[in-house]
Amino acid sequence: SGFPTSFTPQFTTDVLLSLVVPNLVWKAGGMASALRKLSAAVLFSLLRHCKERDALIHPEMTGHLIPVLHSNLEDAECTTRELACVCLSLILEQTSSETFGAICEANTRVFDSLHPRLLDLLDDSHDPVRMAACGALGEFLTLAYSTESFNLDLHSLEKITTTLLIQLDDPEREMQEHVFEVLLLMLQLQ
């Protein structure tokens, strides 16, 4: 049989580049929306599989995925937004500070707007999206603090802290806990 028995890094990269990433790019229409959601779910499955096997994502693939997932944070479908956040968390968690710095330099527009977009998602109308955004924001902050070439300015840090403190007053206990974890992480990183 011609099918691989395990997910080699090359097989995963080939699947991502040829099948998943093209369908994550926004296009109008119901079919395109359904394909984005399905592609985000497939990406999540592949990333989780890589994490379970301690297989790292190729840095070049990370550079392709982060901007595409960034665009999916604004999708009209809440499940797609949630999956985009979870996928970003998994990717950022597996990204070295050197790779993160190189990707930031190559695509400054995306990275300058990533944490503001994640902060905006803390006000999403769906709690699972809000909680997933906390996870992605935490991974982003961990990398941002460990990368010399990427610097969060004082204004950005104040905005992040203020937004998190406002969200800490959420009526949902689970949301409060997710926000509190990000605030604790910021303290530990300081």
Image (cartoon, rainbow, N blue to C red):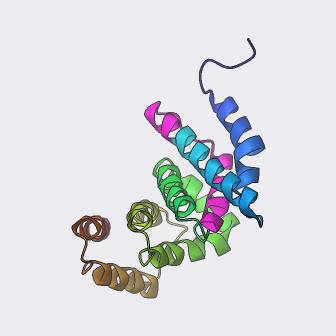
Q: Is residue 167 visible?
A: yes
Residue at left offset 62%, top offset 68%:
75
| Residue 49 lies within the magenta run | yes
Number of on-image labels: 0
**47, 97: nearer the viewer:** 47
On the rendered structure, is 15 left or right of 189? right
Res. 156 image quadrant? bottom left
Q: Residue furthest left?
A: 173
Q: For the N terminus, which image quadrant? A: top right
Residue at left offset 40%, top offset 62%:
128
On the rendered structure, is 81 left or right of 171? right
Q: For the C terminus, which image quadrant? A: bottom left
| Residue 132 lies within the magenta run | no
Residue 91 higher or lower than 177, as above or below: above
Residue 171 image point, x, y percent: 24, 77
Residue 126 image point, x, y percent: 43, 69
Find the magenta span and give its range.
48-72
On the rendered structure, is 166 left or right of 43? left
Residue 34 higher or lower than 134, as above or below: above
Res. 123 image quadrant? bottom left
**6, 57: nearer the viewer:** 6
Q: Can residue 63 be seen in this view?
A: no
Q: Which residue lies furthest to the top in this view?
A: 1
**63, 101: nearer the viewer:** 63
Residue at left offset 55%, top offset 67%:
149
Residue 113 image point, x, y percent: 58, 76
Residue 89 image point, x, y percent: 47, 55
